[in-house]
Image (cartoon, rainbow, N blue to C red):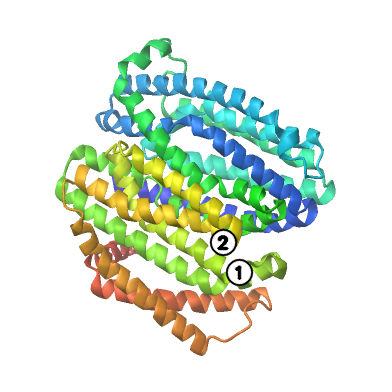
Amino acid sequence: MSRVSKSLKNAKVGVFFFTVSIFLQFFSRKIFLDELGDDFIGLESTLRSILGFLNLAELGIGTAIGFTLYKPLYDNNQKEINKIIALLGVLYKKIGLAILAVGSIISLFFPLIFSDTNFSLLLIYFVFYTLMASTLLAYFVNYHASLFGADQKGYIIQKYFQSFNIIRVLLQVIVVIYYKNFFLYIILELLFSVVYSIVLRKKIKQIYPWLIINYSEKSSVIREYPQVIKKIKQVFFHKMSQFVKNGTDNLLIYGLINLQSVAMFGNYFLVFSKLNSLIMMAFAGTGSAVGNLIAEDDKENIKKVFWELVTIQFFIAGFFSLTIYHTMDALIILWLGEKYVLSQLILILFISNFFIMQISSTIDRFKNAYGLYSDIWAAVSEAIINLGVSFILGKIYGIAGIIMGTLSSMFIIAVLWKPYFLFKHGFNKNVLTYWKGLIPILVIFALSGFSVNFLVNKFFITDSSSGIIDWVLYATKITVLVLTIYGTLLFCFIKSFRVFAYRVKSLIMKRINN
């Protein structure tokens, strides 16, 4: 199966399951907020953020191992693959034990951390240790699953993970409605994680019968890969920066504001995080496909694929940014109620973060495929800027100030630094070629944004929050308008977008003819 075919299969499976999951998450979020309360949802989000901090101990091992697997998978070197997976197992076991130890120590301070909450310490400890146990399964049982991702078979993980996730959420909804029991709600998380781990391990044995699950020389294998250990140390700092960017907002909001604000922030965060994840599913397998492409070392093809992905990602970022801007407030009112609508400034900041994350994802994909992790200072700087600005502005402007911290750090590092680093050390070219190619796309996005905003204000005056049908009709009109203006301008003026459009047309025609 070709790289493109594998990528498409990953995308189709991922998008299907994830779309179902997203609708279920939105449906269940409303029920959980109503039945369990804002405070409990805020508490759960805060404890998950603490676990996210503990997961920093993962050090980016999975990323570094994935990079190391590209070449032996391309060469079908089964002996080498077994050694690398064994190395992953040794390292993950050490990390899992470290997470358990540090998590236990942190939990000793829960009486101080959660002194202002109305929940019993028994419940807080139960939620924390149940979620931690669920997390640790990935370190002790599921680590072989990294092979699926590197081998462009991520769709297998998604198929099982999303299926179990959908069933779990449905059962949680039933438990919450009929029993309103916090303990049953949380225990289902661990139960389904255990079942998922067992099923996934059996699937690994089935697809890779030659894979040695219990490698006999695990300890000695560490000494054979000093380069991998070096990459892991470098990736750690990038993982730390990523956590600060995505995982500390809940902690800062709890510390600077309150648990209710964590829940309100979480509603918007859910929309954007699920949208980000959906897009990641659509691009599932492209990371390993790029790694495979770079292993072939065809510079002309690398350049062509890079610009196609840049343009596609820009189109997706612009399309969703413009659509969400005009439909989000009404969606929140219909979904949760008017009291959960945050300010227009907060919405714009969320959209800005989403936009930067999307347009920089292609840079990250190629940077990871080249194994370019040595810019440790950039990762540290991103984390410091994020935390510093978020803390200072958060005390002044609340939620908006905290999001500004994330936005400022992403702009400096993701937008300005990472392209320079990739072009200098990966492509061996001047970064000006990147900006020359990007500026026309930026101009088209800005022009599209002004045009859409003008037409919406002029002709689309309607109460889109009066009912679900009205909102759907309004959102459909906005979608068509954005697609027409933004898509047409990109097609007319950006060559790489035309190449992508013709490729999609060719695939559709082939399907129809078959």
Q: Amino acid at mark 1?
A: Ser
* Left or right of residue 207, residue 367 in this image: left
> Compared to 147, does 500 lie above or below?
below
Q: Nearer the viewer, mark 2 or mark 1?
A: 2
Compared across the picture, whether 204 is left or right of 132 comes to left
Location of residue 76 by image quarter: top left
What is the secondary structure assignment of the residue under circle 1? loop
Query: Which image quarter is the C terminus in?
Result: bottom left
Farthest residue to the right: give it: 179
Q: Which residue lies at the image location 61% right of the left edge and 44% below the top edge?
A: 165
Residue 124, quarter of the rendered image: top right
Q: Position of residue 78 (x, y in %)?
A: 32, 22
- Give the number of callouts: 2
289 shown above or below 32: above
- Counting from the top left corner in percent of width and height, residue 60 is at 42, 33
The residue that disc 2 covers is 400
Q: Position of residue 417 (x, y in %)?
A: 30, 50
Camera sees residue 2 = no
- Quadrant that contains the N terminus: top left
Whether the residues at callouts 2 and 1 have beta carbons within 8 Å, the answer is: yes
Residue denoted by label 1:
343
